[in-house]
Image: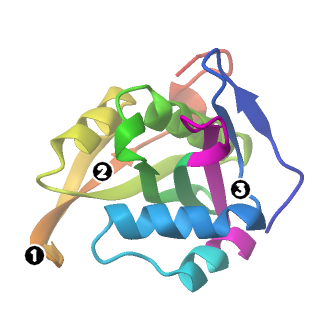
């Protein structure tokens, strides 16, 4: 459900904010460029307007100066358990801390909503993403054999447990 937008800015001028419906085409385009198989616009829209799902975007200026979606994060809060579904950053903006900023805001949001645990799945070969998650304290708790297609690959299931007690309110994560 789209609520009043929360925005967090950093020194580089990139804003992490709750996504708006006007960003849906950009999110879907980025999704199609990054994930195989990608979620379609209807699936992303269901998260944008859903009751338990939340979509954050990282917005900044393109080389031409126009505001654009540089990344997005889709997650859900189901009582005490939260689940990260998608996180993506434009390839030409990677390595600038955008994914880390979105993860930070996601974790803070989940904690504010009384979430206790955050779960996610990541391709076994995606060492960059796994390193990001591990830097926040996520630990592998299981594997799903052959979970991903195109190409077929195992999924690592990772969990960040007890966020209400592990992450103090003043912690910059």
Tell me which corner region of the image, top left, top right, bottom left or bottom right, holds residue 3: bottom right
User: Between residues 30 and 116, which one lies in front from this camera angle?
Assistant: 30
Tell me which corner region of the image, top left, top right, bottom left or bottom right, holds residue 160: top left
Q: Residues within 10 Å of mark 3 (few under 14, many from 20)?
A: many
- Reading the chain from its start, which is encountered first: label 2 or label 3? 3
Which residue ends up furthest to the front in the rendered image?
64
Question: What is the C-alpha distance between the residues marked 1 and 2?
Answer: 19 Å
Which residue ends up furthest to the right in the rendered image?
4
* Residue 114 x %, y %: 69, 47
- Reading the chain from its start, which is encountered first: label 1 or label 3? 3
Q: Is residue 146 visible?
A: yes
Question: What is the C-alpha distance between the residues marked 1 and 3?
Answer: 31 Å
Q: Is residue 143 above or below residue 163?
A: below
Which residue bears the numbered disc 3?
19
The span picked out in magenta is 47-69
Which residue bears the numbered disc 1?
152
Q: Is residue 138 above or below residue 71?
A: above
User: Between residues 117 and 72, which one lies in front from this camera angle?
Assistant: 72
Secondary structure under the numbered disc 3 in the rendered image: loop
Secondary structure under the numbered disc 1 in the rendered image: loop
Q: Is residue 51 visible?
A: no
Q: How many marks?
A: 3
């Amino acid at each position: 459900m789209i609520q009043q937008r929360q925005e967090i800015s950093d020194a580089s001028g990139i804003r992490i904010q709750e996504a708006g419906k006007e960003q849906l085409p950009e999110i879907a385009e980025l999704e199609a460029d990054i994930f195989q198989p990608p979620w379609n616009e209807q699936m992303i829209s269901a998260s944008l307007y859903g009751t338990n799902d939340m979509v954050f975007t990282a917005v900044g200026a393109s080389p031409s100066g126009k505001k654009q979606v540089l990344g997005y994060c889709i997650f859900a809060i189901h009582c005490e358990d939260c689940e990260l579904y998608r996180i993506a950053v434009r390839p030409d903006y990677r390595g600038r801390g955008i994914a880390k900023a979105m993860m930070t805001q996601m974790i803070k949001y989940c904690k504010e909503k009384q979430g206790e645990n955050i779960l996610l799945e990541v391709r076994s070969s995606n060492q960059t993403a796994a390193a990001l998650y591990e830097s926040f304290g996520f630990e592998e708790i299981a594997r799903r054999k052959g979970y991903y297609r195109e190409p077929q690959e195992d999924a690592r299931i990772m969990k960040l447990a007890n966020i209400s007690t592990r992450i103090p309110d003043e912690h910059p994560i």
